[in-house]
Every structure is written in C-alpha cells, then in structure tokens.
Image (cartoon, rainbow, N blue to C red):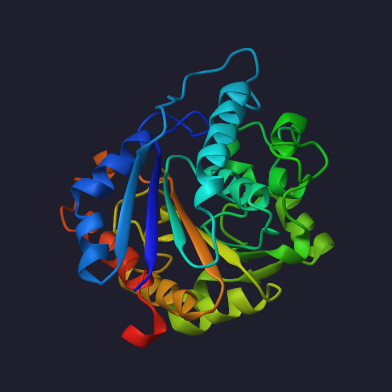
Amino acid sequence: MVSINILGYPSSAAAYCVGVEDAPAALREAGLVAALESAGHQVDDLGDLPVHLWKPDQERPRAQNLDEEVEALRALADTAAPFVATDSRLLVLGGSCTVALGLCAAVADAGIEPHLVYVDRHLDLNTPDSTAEGSLSWMGMAHALGLPGAEESLVRLTDRSPLLAPGHLSLGVEPTVEATGWERDQVDHLGIAVTTQAELVADPAAAGLASRGALPDGPFVVHVDVDVLDFLDAPLAENVNGRNSGPTVSQLGQALAALSREPGLIGMSVGQLVPAHASADPTSLGRFVDALAQAGKTPLER
C-alpha cells in the first residue's frame, strides 16, 4: 500500500486561456480517488487551493499574470511541503504546467534536493526574451533552471535558486515538435537528458526507465503535461495540436507504471488538462484516471 495525498492547484493564471483550472474537480468527478483506493492505497484528499484565472495582461504581455502566478505557486509550495516525504506520495492536480515548479519548490522546502522527470510535448525552456507568446506555462523549465532572460521573481520562488540543476532534469519530450531554436540550443548547451516521444511510443516502460536513469539516485518527482498525448486518442489538453503524434493514454500509463516501480518516487503533478475538450470523448478522462491509478501501484502489486 502507498499513502497518497492529493492536492488541487486550480490555476490558469500562467496558461494560454481559462479552462485548466477546472481539471482538479473533473479528475475527482471521473473517479480518481476511488480508482486509487481500489488499487489498495490509502488516499487523503487535501482539497484545492484558491482558484486563479488567466486574463489578458496588457502590462506584462510577455510574462502574463506573473505576480499572481508567483503568489499562487508560493502558496502551493507552502501547503504541499509538509506532505513531501519519502514514505508517501504527493499528487498535485493542476492547473497550468507551472504546477511542476510549485511541486519542486515544495520538495526543496521539505529539505530534499529536487530531481524531476518532465513529461511534456514541449521543452518549456523559453523565456520572455526568447518568445512573444507570453504564456508562462511554456517557460516553466527555463525558470526552474534560472536561464538568462527568466523572470527573477519566479526563479527565486524558494530559497533554493535555481530550483534545478541541468543534471537534475530529465525531459520526456519531442524536441523537434514546436520547439524554438533557443530551446534546442539550451538542451545542447546544458546537456539536458531527453527521452523522445518516439521512444515513449515504441517502448513505454523502457522510456520511463531511461528518463529516470538520467537523474541521480534518490527521491524524484514526475510531471505530466497531458499535451504529450495523441489528441485523437485522448482530447484532454489545452494545446490541441498534438494530433496523430505522441503516446496513447495506455502507453503513457505503462511509462508511469515503470516510473512508479523505481525507488524514490515521492510526487507527481498533472497539468494543462481542459475538461471541456475531454467532453469530445467521454472515455478519455476515465482512461487517464486509470493511468494515474496504475502509476500509484507498488512493485509488489505487479
């Protein structure tokens, strides 16, 4: 049995638009708690943090809603840190994928060096200087690493700054899809480990193990941005461009299951899920919940 604490982060402040703030409630309504309990785990639902909504930020168009996002992530870290432990797991339901920054900040505040497997369709290594898109959800890992051009208030989210060293980040992405030249240059310059979507589709379990193997031993956390999925298999994501590419929900579940078998998994965050999109396929949320429940199982249950 694994003790799992669930915390909702219903914030779209860093997203491209509203919608992802509805994900924590939708995942619960799709049976997440019951699925984890049916897998034999002790589940404590800690509820949700306050809602934060995206709005057009004309004063800071390249880093929209920065101050609100920093405040929201700081509250997430403060709330989550007491539940970070090596004998339990914390599941944080976002929200935009900057939720991974809040999870890593909570780990650091708990006195544990953050190590992160980041599963996403995008590198998220942009800064307000490298892109005019303005959405901080496309910049999370740039701020975790403290790259040049990143916003100081987000880089200094916690006393540990930057949150991650390049060798403590493993990206499960497709670097040729929608990546900017700046992002590809950062991967090469910093030597960040990348496990591609092609590898994830070909052998999900091996890809999961490869992404974990690129990190040092010890406690680690996983972030899942649902836009990594093939949008035609599971129309869950805020970003709807991932058609006919990326893993299915089943393949992602296999990768997460492999990661869950590795010693040291202490937390996971989920981001960029828009329930309004999921309504196009009524099975998609339930299948995703099943994948998360599968990842919650321990090695002895396999």
Question: In this view of the protein, can residue 17 be seen by the observer?
Answer: yes
Q: Which residue occupies 51% across, 45% down? A: 80
Instruction: Identify the image quadrant of residue 209.
Output: bottom right
In percent of width and height, residue 255 lies at: 44, 75
Q: Classify 246 as above or below 144.
A: below
Q: Classify 218 as above or below 143.
A: below
Query: In the image, is 240 to the left or to the right of 25?
Result: right
In percent of width and height, residue 67 lies at: 62, 22
Most distant residue in the left direction: 282
Instruction: Identify the image quadrant of residue 10.
Output: top left
Query: In the image, is 240 to the left or to the right of 141?
Result: left
Q: Which residue occupies 30% across, 68% down? A: 41
Q: Which residue occupies 69% across, 54% down? A: 111
Give 54 or 223, whichever is nearer the viewer: 223
In percent of width and height, residue 252 lies at: 39, 70
In percent of width and height, residue 53 lies at: 42, 24
Question: In this view of the protein, can residue 125 be seen by the observer?
Answer: no
| Quarter of the image where the C terminus is located | bottom left
Give 233 or 299, whichever is nearer the viewer: 299
